[in-house]
Image (cartoon, rainbow, N blue to C red):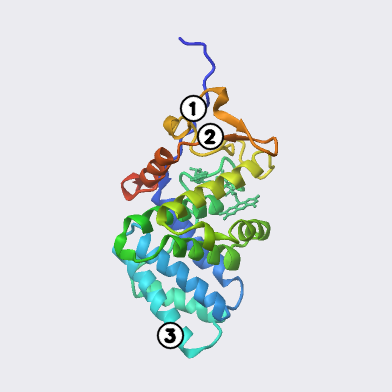
Protein backbone atom coordinates (compact mmCIF):
# COMPACT_ATOMS: atom_id res chain seq x y z
CA UNK A 1 0.00 0.00 0.00
CA UNK A 2 1.23 3.49 -0.80
CA UNK A 3 2.24 5.63 2.17
CA UNK A 4 2.41 8.95 0.30
CA UNK A 5 0.26 11.73 1.74
CA UNK A 6 -2.59 12.58 -0.59
CA UNK A 7 -5.01 15.48 -0.71
CA UNK A 8 -8.37 14.63 0.90
CA UNK A 9 -10.76 13.11 -1.62
CA UNK A 10 -13.34 15.88 -1.41
CA UNK A 11 -16.09 15.28 -3.91
CA UNK A 12 -19.51 16.90 -3.95
CA UNK A 13 -22.60 16.00 -5.94
CA UNK A 14 -25.38 18.24 -7.13
CA UNK A 15 -28.71 16.87 -5.93
CA UNK A 16 -32.15 17.95 -7.09
CA UNK A 17 -33.61 17.67 -3.58
CA UNK A 18 -31.17 20.34 -2.34
CA UNK A 19 -32.28 22.68 -5.13
CA UNK A 20 -35.99 22.03 -4.57
CA UNK A 21 -35.58 22.44 -0.80
CA UNK A 22 -33.72 25.73 -1.25
CA UNK A 23 -36.41 27.04 -3.60
CA UNK A 24 -39.14 25.92 -1.19
CA UNK A 25 -37.34 27.43 1.81
CA UNK A 26 -36.76 30.67 -0.08
CA UNK A 27 -40.44 31.04 -1.00
CA UNK A 28 -42.02 29.68 2.21
CA UNK A 29 -39.66 31.04 4.87
CA UNK A 30 -37.56 33.91 3.54
CA UNK A 31 -39.93 35.91 1.34
CA UNK A 32 -42.86 36.13 3.82
CA UNK A 33 -40.77 37.70 6.59
CA UNK A 34 -42.21 41.13 5.68
CA UNK A 35 -44.94 42.77 3.59
CA UNK A 36 -43.65 43.32 0.07
CA UNK A 37 -43.38 46.75 -1.57
CA UNK A 38 -43.24 47.22 -5.35
CA UNK A 39 -39.45 46.80 -5.58
CA UNK A 40 -39.62 43.62 -3.47
CA UNK A 41 -42.35 42.28 -5.77
CA UNK A 42 -40.23 43.07 -8.86
CA UNK A 43 -37.24 41.24 -7.31
CA UNK A 44 -39.44 38.29 -6.37
CA UNK A 45 -40.88 38.11 -9.87
CA UNK A 46 -37.37 38.17 -11.36
CA UNK A 47 -36.42 35.26 -9.02
CA UNK A 48 -39.53 33.26 -9.99
CA UNK A 49 -38.90 33.83 -13.72
CA UNK A 50 -35.26 32.70 -13.39
CA UNK A 51 -36.36 29.52 -11.63
CA UNK A 52 -39.13 28.89 -14.12
CA UNK A 53 -37.06 29.41 -17.26
CA UNK A 54 -33.69 28.02 -16.25
CA UNK A 55 -34.06 25.24 -13.67
CA UNK A 56 -34.25 21.76 -15.11
CA UNK A 57 -37.47 20.56 -13.42
CA UNK A 58 -40.69 18.63 -13.91
CA UNK A 59 -43.93 20.06 -15.25
CA UNK A 60 -45.89 20.56 -11.96
CA UNK A 61 -43.03 22.65 -10.57
CA UNK A 62 -42.91 24.74 -13.74
CA UNK A 63 -46.70 25.16 -13.67
CA UNK A 64 -46.50 26.32 -10.04
CA UNK A 65 -43.85 28.93 -10.96
CA UNK A 66 -45.91 30.16 -13.91
CA UNK A 67 -48.93 30.51 -11.59
CA UNK A 68 -46.81 32.57 -9.20
CA UNK A 69 -45.55 34.76 -12.05
CA UNK A 70 -49.12 35.43 -13.25
CA UNK A 71 -50.36 36.22 -9.74
CA UNK A 72 -47.43 38.58 -9.12
CA UNK A 73 -48.17 40.33 -12.42
CA UNK A 74 -51.71 41.01 -11.23
CA UNK A 75 -50.42 42.54 -8.01
CA UNK A 76 -47.96 44.72 -9.99
CA UNK A 77 -50.80 45.89 -12.24
CA UNK A 78 -52.95 46.80 -9.25
CA UNK A 79 -50.04 48.86 -7.83
CA UNK A 80 -50.57 47.66 -4.29
CA UNK A 81 -48.34 46.24 -1.57
CA UNK A 82 -48.45 42.51 -0.97
CA UNK A 83 -49.05 41.64 2.66
CA UNK A 84 -47.57 38.49 4.15
CA UNK A 85 -51.07 37.01 4.48
CA UNK A 86 -51.92 37.69 0.82
CA UNK A 87 -48.55 36.34 -0.28
CA UNK A 88 -49.04 33.09 1.67
CA UNK A 89 -52.48 32.71 0.06
CA UNK A 90 -50.94 33.28 -3.39
CA UNK A 91 -48.33 30.64 -2.64
CA UNK A 92 -50.97 28.17 -1.45
CA UNK A 93 -53.24 28.66 -4.48
CA UNK A 94 -50.32 28.49 -6.95
CA UNK A 95 -49.27 25.13 -5.51
CA UNK A 96 -52.81 23.78 -5.31
CA UNK A 97 -53.74 24.56 -8.90
CA UNK A 98 -50.46 23.02 -10.14
CA UNK A 99 -51.00 19.94 -7.99
CA UNK A 100 -47.57 20.58 -6.54
CA UNK A 101 -46.20 20.90 -2.99
CA UNK A 102 -43.02 22.79 -2.14
CA UNK A 103 -40.52 20.99 0.07
CA UNK A 104 -38.17 22.92 2.32
CA UNK A 105 -35.77 20.75 4.31
CA UNK A 106 -34.81 17.58 2.47
CA UNK A 107 -31.06 18.12 2.31
CA UNK A 108 -28.92 15.45 0.66
CA UNK A 109 -25.56 16.79 -0.58
CA UNK A 110 -26.22 19.85 1.61
CA UNK A 111 -26.89 17.83 4.78
CA UNK A 112 -24.56 18.89 7.62
CA UNK A 113 -22.87 16.62 10.13
CA UNK A 114 -25.03 18.40 12.75
CA UNK A 115 -28.48 19.91 12.21
CA UNK A 116 -27.20 23.50 12.52
CA UNK A 117 -24.61 23.18 9.73
CA UNK A 118 -25.20 23.71 5.98
CA UNK A 119 -28.78 23.20 4.69
CA UNK A 120 -30.39 26.31 3.18
CA UNK A 121 -27.31 28.48 2.40
CA UNK A 122 -25.65 25.48 0.74
CA UNK A 123 -28.82 24.75 -1.26
CA UNK A 124 -29.04 28.40 -2.26
CA UNK A 125 -25.48 28.49 -3.64
CA UNK A 126 -26.20 25.22 -5.47
CA UNK A 127 -29.35 26.76 -6.98
CA UNK A 128 -27.49 29.95 -8.00
CA UNK A 129 -24.71 28.02 -9.78
CA UNK A 130 -27.28 25.78 -11.48
CA UNK A 131 -29.11 28.91 -12.69
CA UNK A 132 -25.99 30.56 -14.15
CA UNK A 133 -25.13 27.37 -16.03
CA UNK A 134 -28.63 26.45 -17.19
CA UNK A 135 -29.77 29.92 -18.26
CA UNK A 136 -26.69 29.81 -20.50
CA UNK A 137 -27.55 26.39 -21.87
CA UNK A 138 -31.17 27.24 -22.55
CA UNK A 139 -31.04 29.76 -25.36
CA UNK A 140 -34.81 30.01 -25.28
CA UNK A 141 -34.66 31.55 -21.81
CA UNK A 142 -33.66 34.85 -23.48
CA UNK A 143 -32.17 35.92 -20.20
CA UNK A 144 -28.73 37.52 -20.52
CA UNK A 145 -25.76 36.54 -18.34
CA UNK A 146 -26.05 39.91 -16.59
CA UNK A 147 -29.77 39.48 -15.93
CA UNK A 148 -29.20 36.10 -14.28
CA UNK A 149 -26.86 37.77 -11.79
CA UNK A 150 -29.14 40.76 -11.29
CA UNK A 151 -31.94 38.29 -10.40
CA UNK A 152 -29.66 36.45 -7.96
CA UNK A 153 -28.47 39.72 -6.41
CA UNK A 154 -32.08 40.92 -6.08
CA UNK A 155 -33.06 37.78 -4.20
CA UNK A 156 -30.03 37.93 -1.87
CA UNK A 157 -30.26 41.62 -1.04
CA UNK A 158 -34.05 41.71 -0.52
CA UNK A 159 -34.86 38.30 0.96
CA UNK A 160 -31.83 36.37 2.24
CA UNK A 161 -32.29 36.26 6.03
CA UNK A 162 -28.54 36.20 6.83
CA UNK A 163 -27.88 39.92 7.18
CA UNK A 164 -24.07 39.93 7.07
CA UNK A 165 -24.14 37.52 4.06
CA UNK A 166 -26.46 39.95 2.32
CA UNK A 167 -24.22 42.91 3.02
CA UNK A 168 -21.06 41.11 1.88
CA UNK A 169 -22.77 39.93 -1.28
CA UNK A 170 -24.20 43.38 -2.08
CA UNK A 171 -20.71 44.87 -1.76
CA UNK A 172 -19.17 42.16 -3.93
CA UNK A 173 -21.91 42.51 -6.58
CA UNK A 174 -21.93 46.30 -6.71
CA UNK A 175 -20.20 46.46 -10.11
CA UNK A 176 -21.72 43.44 -11.87
CA UNK A 177 -23.10 45.68 -14.64
CA UNK A 178 -19.56 46.42 -15.81
CA UNK A 179 -18.09 43.04 -14.84
CA UNK A 180 -20.62 40.68 -16.47
CA UNK A 181 -21.91 40.61 -20.01
CA UNK A 182 -21.95 37.04 -21.30
CA UNK A 183 -23.21 33.86 -19.63
CA UNK A 184 -19.60 32.68 -19.30
CA UNK A 185 -18.79 35.90 -17.39
CA UNK A 186 -21.76 35.19 -15.09
CA UNK A 187 -20.77 31.56 -14.41
CA UNK A 188 -17.20 32.60 -13.59
CA UNK A 189 -18.22 35.68 -11.58
CA UNK A 190 -20.38 33.57 -9.26
CA UNK A 191 -17.73 30.85 -8.95
CA UNK A 192 -15.11 33.46 -8.03
CA UNK A 193 -17.43 35.24 -5.58
CA UNK A 194 -18.30 31.96 -3.87
CA UNK A 195 -14.60 31.09 -3.56
CA UNK A 196 -13.97 34.49 -1.92
CA UNK A 197 -16.65 33.63 0.66
CA UNK A 198 -15.11 30.15 1.10
CA UNK A 199 -11.70 31.72 1.77
CA UNK A 200 -13.17 34.16 4.29
CA UNK A 201 -15.02 31.39 6.16
CA UNK A 202 -12.26 28.77 6.12
CA UNK A 203 -11.62 29.06 9.86
CA UNK A 204 -15.07 30.33 10.85
CA UNK A 205 -16.97 28.54 13.62
CA UNK A 206 -20.03 28.27 11.35
CA UNK A 207 -18.14 25.89 9.02
CA UNK A 208 -19.01 22.21 9.32
CA UNK A 209 -15.72 20.46 10.27
CA UNK A 210 -16.71 17.46 8.16
CA UNK A 211 -17.14 19.76 5.12
CA UNK A 212 -14.19 22.17 5.19
CA UNK A 213 -14.34 25.32 3.07
CA UNK A 214 -12.02 24.85 0.11
CA UNK A 215 -11.15 26.61 -3.10
CA UNK A 216 -13.59 24.87 -5.43
CA UNK A 217 -13.24 22.61 -7.32
CA UNK A 218 -10.62 20.64 -5.34
CA UNK A 219 -8.06 18.70 -7.41
CA UNK A 220 -9.95 15.51 -6.52
CA UNK A 221 -12.86 16.81 -8.63
CA UNK A 222 -10.91 18.55 -11.39
CA UNK A 223 -7.15 18.35 -11.38
CA UNK A 224 -6.84 20.10 -14.76
CA UNK A 225 -8.84 23.11 -13.52
CA UNK A 226 -5.68 24.32 -11.77
CA UNK A 227 -2.72 25.46 -13.81
CA UNK A 228 -0.50 23.10 -11.82
CA UNK A 229 -1.03 20.78 -8.86
CA UNK A 230 2.40 21.08 -7.26
CA UNK A 231 2.92 23.30 -4.19
CA UNK A 232 3.90 26.05 -6.68
CA UNK A 233 0.23 25.89 -7.59
CA UNK A 234 -0.19 29.06 -5.58
CA UNK A 235 1.19 32.49 -6.38
CA UNK A 236 1.80 35.41 -4.09
CA UNK A 237 -0.44 38.36 -4.76
CA UNK A 238 0.39 42.01 -4.14
CA UNK A 239 -1.18 41.75 -0.69
CA UNK A 240 1.06 38.82 0.27
CA UNK A 241 -1.90 36.40 0.20
CA UNK A 242 -1.58 33.15 -1.71
CA UNK A 243 -3.95 32.46 -4.56
CA UNK A 244 -4.64 29.37 -6.62
CA UNK A 245 -3.82 29.64 -10.33
CA UNK A 246 -6.75 28.48 -12.44
CA UNK A 247 -7.00 27.25 -16.00
CA UNK A 248 -10.14 29.23 -16.86
CA UNK A 249 -11.22 27.42 -20.08
CA UNK A 250 -11.00 24.01 -18.35
CA UNK A 251 -12.67 25.38 -15.23
CA UNK A 252 -15.56 26.82 -17.25
CA UNK A 253 -16.05 23.47 -18.97
CA UNK A 254 -16.03 21.74 -15.57
CA UNK A 255 -18.63 24.13 -14.07
CA UNK A 256 -20.89 23.75 -17.12
CA UNK A 257 -20.74 19.96 -16.75
CA UNK A 258 -20.98 19.87 -12.95
CA UNK A 259 -24.16 21.99 -12.82
CA UNK A 260 -25.72 20.54 -16.00
CA UNK A 261 -29.07 18.66 -15.88
CA UNK A 262 -27.26 15.40 -16.73
CA UNK A 263 -25.16 15.70 -13.58
CA UNK A 264 -27.98 16.61 -11.17
CA UNK A 265 -28.79 13.56 -9.08
CA UNK A 266 -32.47 12.80 -8.68
CA UNK A 267 -31.74 10.45 -5.80
CA UNK A 268 -34.15 10.18 -2.85
CA UNK A 269 -32.88 11.03 0.61
CA UNK A 270 -31.66 7.91 2.44
P1 LIG B 1 -21.31 26.15 0.56
O1 LIG B 1 -20.25 27.20 0.59
O2 LIG B 1 -22.69 26.56 0.91
O3 LIG B 1 -21.30 25.50 -0.89
C1 LIG B 1 -22.28 24.58 -1.33
C2 LIG B 1 -21.68 23.68 -2.38
O4 LIG B 1 -21.34 24.47 -3.52
C3 LIG B 1 -20.36 23.01 -1.98
O5 LIG B 1 -20.62 21.82 -1.28
C4 LIG B 1 -19.71 22.76 -3.32
O6 LIG B 1 -20.19 21.57 -3.89
C5 LIG B 1 -20.18 23.92 -4.17
N1 LIG B 1 -19.20 25.00 -4.27
C6 LIG B 1 -18.39 25.48 -3.29
N2 LIG B 1 -17.68 26.51 -3.76
C7 LIG B 1 -18.02 26.68 -5.05
C8 LIG B 1 -17.61 27.59 -6.06
N3 LIG B 1 -16.68 28.51 -5.84
N4 LIG B 1 -18.17 27.49 -7.28
C9 LIG B 1 -19.10 26.54 -7.54
N5 LIG B 1 -19.53 25.65 -6.62
C10 LIG B 1 -19.00 25.73 -5.39
N6 LIG B 1 -21.75 32.84 5.57
C11 LIG B 1 -21.04 33.68 6.38
O7 LIG B 1 -20.74 33.31 7.52
N7 LIG B 1 -20.65 34.92 5.94
C12 LIG B 1 -21.00 35.40 4.70
O8 LIG B 1 -20.66 36.53 4.33
C13 LIG B 1 -21.78 34.55 3.85
N8 LIG B 1 -22.19 34.99 2.64
C14 LIG B 1 -23.02 34.20 1.88
C15 LIG B 1 -23.52 34.70 0.66
C16 LIG B 1 -24.41 33.93 -0.07
C17 LIG B 1 -24.96 34.49 -1.36
C18 LIG B 1 -24.80 32.64 0.37
C19 LIG B 1 -25.78 31.82 -0.42
C20 LIG B 1 -24.29 32.13 1.56
C21 LIG B 1 -23.40 32.91 2.33
N9 LIG B 1 -22.90 32.43 3.53
C22 LIG B 1 -22.13 33.25 4.33
C23 LIG B 1 -23.07 31.02 3.91
C24 LIG B 1 -21.84 30.19 3.48
O9 LIG B 1 -21.31 30.65 2.24
C25 LIG B 1 -22.17 28.72 3.29
O10 LIG B 1 -23.25 28.58 2.40
C26 LIG B 1 -22.51 27.99 4.56
O11 LIG B 1 -21.46 28.19 5.50
C27 LIG B 1 -22.67 26.46 4.30
O12 LIG B 1 -21.46 26.01 3.72
P2 LIG B 1 -21.28 24.62 2.99
O13 LIG B 1 -20.12 23.90 3.57
O14 LIG B 1 -22.57 23.88 3.00
O15 LIG B 1 -20.87 24.95 1.47
**CB contact under 8 Å: marks 1 and 3:** no
Snapshot quadrant of residue 142: bottom left
- Image location (x, y in percent) of residue 261: 33, 50
Viewer-side label of 2, 3: 2
Look at the numbered disc 3 and say if its residue's Cβ is closer than 8 Å to ligand 1: no
Q: Earlier in the sequence, mark 2 or mark 3?
A: 3
Residue marked by disc 2: 245
202 displayed left or right of 69: right
Q: In front: 98, or 242?
A: 242
The span from disc 1 to disc 2 (Cα, nearest Å) is 7 Å
Q: Which residue is drawn at 59% across and 62% down?
A: 160
Q: Residue at x 39, y 79 (%)?
A: 70
- Image location (x, y in percent) of residue 211: 56, 37
Q: Residue at x 51, y 67 (%)?
A: 28
Q: Which of marks 1 and 2 is nearer the N terminus?
A: 1
Q: How crowded is mark 3: few (under 14 residues within 10 Å), some or many (20 or more)?
A: few
- Label 2's element? loop
Q: In front: 151, or 65?
A: 151
- Label 1's element? loop
Q: Which mark is residue 228?
A: 1
- Label 3's element? helix
Look at the numbered disc 2 and say if its residue's Cβ is closer than 8 Å to ligand 1: no
Q: Residue 127 carries which label?
A: none
32 displayed left or right of 130: right
Report if residue 248 is visible in the image: yes
Residue marked by disc 3: 74
Image quadrant where one finds the C terminus: top left
- Image location (x, y in percent) of residue 190: 51, 52
Amino acid sequence: ESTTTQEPQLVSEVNQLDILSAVGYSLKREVPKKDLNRDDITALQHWVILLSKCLPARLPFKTFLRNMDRALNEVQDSQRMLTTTDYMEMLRKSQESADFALIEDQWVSCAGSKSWYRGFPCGLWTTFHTLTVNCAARDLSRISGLNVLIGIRGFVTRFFGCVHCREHFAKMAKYIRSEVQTHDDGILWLWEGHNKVNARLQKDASTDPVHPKIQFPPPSMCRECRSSTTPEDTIKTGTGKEETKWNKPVLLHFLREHYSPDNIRVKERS
